[in-house]
Image (cartoon, grey):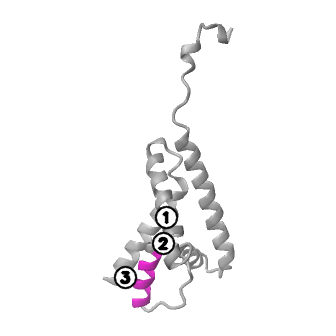
Amino acid sequence: MLQFLDVLLSIVHLSFIVFNLFAWIPKITRKAHFISVVITAASWFLLGIWFGIGYCPFTDWQWQVKEKLGERNLPVNFIEYFAEKITGIDFDPQFINNIIAISFAVVTLLSVCIISTKRKVDYSILIGSDILL
């Protein structure tokens, strides 16, 4: 059961990460992406007040499962763990944290810019007016 839960948490965690990175692109997911980014920021910075900046409940739950499965010396974040697991490379934690911070800042900025730009201006009402002549 714990192994199933570990795999399930990995799938959910990776899906959430991919959603945060790319869901700003399709129009249909932009509002959900914005909400996801706000939830992530709230976790990292509000819950981070009590649990440490960058706190992620998914990682917390998954580390509890992994520890029960006998894994030790887990890194601080899931992305470092996963990157090391699939590549076999021992990454510098600060390097991974920098990539995470930059990526999150970029997608947050993109999301805010896209959400705050309501709709394209309808210029069709200007056709035939003196402004365009």
Q: Is residue 69 visible?
A: no
Relative depth, front residue between 122 and 90: 122
Q: Nearer the viewer, mark 3 or mark 1?
A: 1
Q: Is residue 41 left or right of residue 105?
A: left
Residue 32 got which mark?
Answer: none
Can the viewer see residue 87 in this picture? yes
Q: Is residue 98 above or below residue 22?
A: below
Question: Which residue is tagged 2?
Answer: 47
* Amino acid identity at mark 2: Leu
Left or right side of 103 for 1: left
Reply yes or no: does residue 63 show up in magenta. yes
What segment is highlighted magenta in the picture?
A: 59-68
Q: Quadrant of the N terminus?
A: bottom left
| Circle 1: residue type | Ala
Labels 3 & 1 near each other (Cβ < 8 A): no
Among the two numbered marks 3 and 1 on one chain, the one whose residue lies closer to the N terminus: 3
Considering the numbered disc 3 on the image, is that residue within a helix, a strand or a loop? helix
Which numbered disc covers residue 3?
A: 3
The answer to whether 122 is drawn above or below residue 4 in the figure is above
Q: Earlier in the sequence, mark 1 or mark 2?
A: 1
Circle 1 crowding by C-alpha within 10 Å: few under 14, some 14–19, many from 20? some
Tell me the distance, in whole angstroms, between the alpha carbons under discs 1 and 2.
Answer: 7 Å
